[in-house]
Amino acid sequence: MTFMTNVSGFVPAIAATATLLAAAPDANAEALTLTDIAGREVTLTEAPNKIILGEGRMMYSIAAISEGNPFEKVVGWKDDLILYDPDAFRKFEAAFPQDAERMINFGNPYAGDFSIEAVLEADADLVLLDVGNLFKAEETGLIEKLGKAGVPVVFVDFRRNATENTVPSLLILGRLLGEEQGALEFVDFYIAEMRKVTNVVDQIPAEERPLVVVENAAGWQNDFCCWSFGPYNYGRFVELAGGTNYASKLANAYSIDISMEGIIEADPDHIIGTGANWAEAKPEVTSTLLGYEGDPAVNAEKIDALAMRPGFRDLRAVQDGKYHSIYHQFYNSPYHFIAVQQIAKWLYPDDFADLDPQDTFDRMHAKFMPYDNSGQFWLSASAPAN
Amino acid sequence: MTLTATALDFAYDKRPILQGAAFDPLQPGELTALIGPNASGKSTLFRVIAGLLTPSAGTVTLGETDLATLPVRTRLKRVCFMPQFFVANAALTVFDVVMMARKNLSGWRVTTEDMDAVGEALHGAGIGHLSEAYISDLSGGQAQMVSVAQALIRQANVYMFDEPTSALDLHHQLDVLSRIRATIASRGAIGIVALHDLNLAARFADHLILLRQGTVLAQGAPAQVLHQPEIGATYGVDIHITTGPKEDLVVHAYAS
Amino acid sequence: MPTDTTPPLTAQGIVTAYRRRSGRRVALVALAALALFTTVVIDVITGPADLSFWRVAHVIVNPSVATTKEEVIIWDLRLPVALMAVVVGAMLGAAGAEMQTILNNPLADPFTLGLSSAASFGAALAIVSGLSVIPGVGGLFVTVNAFVVSMLASLALFAFTRLRGVTPEAMILVGIAMLFTFNALLAFLQYGASELQLAQLIFWQLGSLARATWEKVGICMIVLAVVMPYFLSRSWALTALRMGEDKAAALGVNVSLLRLMVLAGVSLLSAVAVSFVGAIAFVGLVGPHIARMIVGEDQRGFLPLSALAGALILSGTSIASKAITPGIVYPIGMITSLIGIPFFVSLILSQRKRHWQ
């Protein structure tokens, strides 16, 4: 697998979608036809304004591209935003209390079935689903039944092939919501910030790239090691940031269970674990609690504790202070360019001395988000005093 | 010491099986045949004597001891009961199961004495050639002979056999019963055998007990009991008794 | 009519044949133990890190010569996993052997009776809904939940036998009812789980040795050291049980009490095993069958060999799971099934004796 072609993989995708966009007439009052991320051609007889989100976390994107109230055209969602990113939910709630209140709750996004009745009851005219649900939606006849009832389904992807599909997904959302302008602006921002990393990193040959182990949800379970990513999602972020992802060499899978011994043997240069505010739903987690309400003092303790776990504490990466923690929800969000920037900064501190991901994130909020940045989204463990 | 039972009652789910069953003292060294039609309560009587079932009334006395006063294990050491024939299908050899009976649940180690005793028992019973065969591979008759061997290898005061010859051919029927009789006599133990075949009962038993619907109708020497009209009435047949070439009683039965 | 090649005609001949078979039985058990030792050694030297046999032996004998990396790999990672495989395999093998004995059923093992589904459900309760049956146990509460719910399931089995009698049929029926009930409840919980919780649940349903620690190995050893001697002390009674209830009762065996006591022992063994390594099916079923085919059902040989067979199976699969792709952890239950089933089928086909008809 060559890094070069994949790094630039999303550019042709953007080009294709942009052409489609350019070719389409002004969408607001007329029918629109588009190709969604699952490759399905979907026709909407009119612009939707009662949308149901198959994942509450789609609000990350909608808020970023929307000019005014991002909830304007949304009537309901599944409750993952509330359960798994309560910090972000509270931001939305504080900014738009009545809208957050009126959102119809369609349950847990992982619990498969969508209640078609509830969708029709809500008088919805569009259902947005994550592409991971495609198979199930087809199998259960969800798409067909909703189609019969005149409710179209459009698939987007911010998770599985995050880096390839984020831009097309944003553009699709822009068309659907009538926020093409906002979408294009955000896409410009995204590309520009990604390029700050890839332009530098593209030049670095494979042999010189540091070895990185990614630990998905570090601290979610006790005495367990480890869930990791193959060349997808966070594994891909590491690759785009100029690192060699350890688990990519083991298998070409989204999620891979790796052994502690393998990690010790591989002797990685960096270890990056993800963390989020899971403590509300699951009090016994020992992960870092990153997010809008992340407390640096609390997280500093937590990351040091994670780094001192048996097996980890003797690793060279930990001894050198190269044990990091980063916000888990970037894995399902269009803001993952921040993750790529921060990872690049960890891997190549000198090359990216001028890069300031915190500033990037602040600027992003100022320009695109209906609320301010706050909290903590990444940190590194302190090098143990020997 | 003698074995006596008085006024035994036993009911299963309100259905009376034994009603005032009692017999006069059985003498040591003597073999008694328990006869009676199907469902007369023979198996239940055996179980009550062995202590596996508790009667609602009545006592069983061995010598001076009321058996009910003994703990179950002790009682079963003194009263050996061989249940009706049942094919077990375990991966155990004939030697194993006879050894198990000899050990009678005590002691983990198998000693040389134990092994010799089992070897002698199997040889004496004429099933030595089956010693290493799995019991699941035996024919019905062979399994029954193993069962008898399991009973006789134990040292007890009372031996009860529930139909020990039902699956055996003629030769082995005679062989098993004569061996049981000889063992009982030599050990001075009390033996009770439940039998369907009145001829076998007449030939081998010193004493007969006729059980019908849970009550003892007749007991005594075979010649005496077999001549009583209760026999014919109980079995629903016409009985005629003659004497065979070796001074043994022969029972002729005719459907009435 | 079965015959031996040279029928022993004298009493001494009979005894000699028995002695020979007993000697063979002891030799086979010793051979199994030796095989187990071998697999453990191979297990300890297998792994993504490149450590030679001599280096590993040296580190074990003289821990002070190890580098930190070697120390962590050998003492904290490989040894606990290898020993856990042995101990859990033995627990499952012994539990399966006694289950099959008291229930007179070749398909019985703790899993058929729903005890491991109960444990999985207890774990799922902890993982998905955060409900702890015993409050305040902290990070261990998934394990504790699994154990407690499994024991509660056994108690339910006990209670039912009080009502309906301690017969194999009653116990099997209740066990199967529980198996299906807990599986259904488990599916219900999965329905509402997030992707991380689902990933965690997979461990429970497919099992993994990778979370072994010295403490867990120690606890399992203690449980085994308490329950096995009890089972062995009841060897003759349990062997008698296989002759039929009547025969056993006539020998003085309190059949109901024996069944309940053994059920208690089996419950403890399987609850502890499953709460530490998840639901590893098949070991408790196949181990005893292998033992039975080799040494028959005299409990003095059958029980130890069942435990050894179980340990061998799990130790072998531990090696296999590490060898597939070095660095990736595979759920062990998946492999025991994949390897075990064809092996088991071939054993059955090669056997002439049928012990369950």
Image: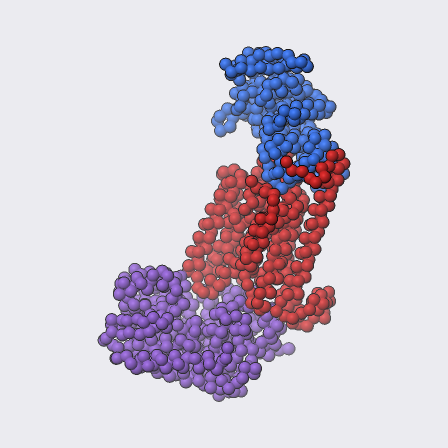
Chain colours: A purple, B blue, C red
Count of number-bearing discs: 0
Q: Quadrant of residue B173?
A: top right
Q: Give the percent coordinates (x, y) of residue B209.
A: 60, 18
- Residue farthest left in this picture: A29
- Residue farthest front in this picture: C5
From the viewer's side, name the closer residue of B222 and A211: B222
Q: Is residue A253 above or below residue C183?
A: below
Q: Is residue B241 visible?
A: yes
Q: Is residue C135 above or below residue A182?
A: above
Q: Is residue C303 visible?
A: no
From the viewer's side, name the closer residue of C140 and C239: C239
Q: Residue at x 53, y 40 (%)?
A: C168
Q: Residue at x 76, y 36 (%)?
A: C12
Q: Residue at x 41, y 67 (%)?
A: A132
Q: Give the percent coordinates (x, y) of residue C293.
A: 63, 46
Q: Residue at x 57, y 82 (%)?
A: A207
Is residue A123 left or right of A287 when viewed as pictured?
left
Q: Give the percent coordinates (x, y) of residue A198.
A: 47, 84
Q: Is residue C172 above or below residue B219?
A: below
Q: Quadrant of residue B50?
A: top right
From the viewer's side, name the closer residue of A73 and A294: A73
Q: Is residue A339 above or below residue C118?
A: below
Q: Give the percent coordinates (x, y) of residue B251.
A: 59, 15
Is residue B205 left or right of A209 when viewed as pictured?
right
* Quadrant holding the N terminus of chain B: top right
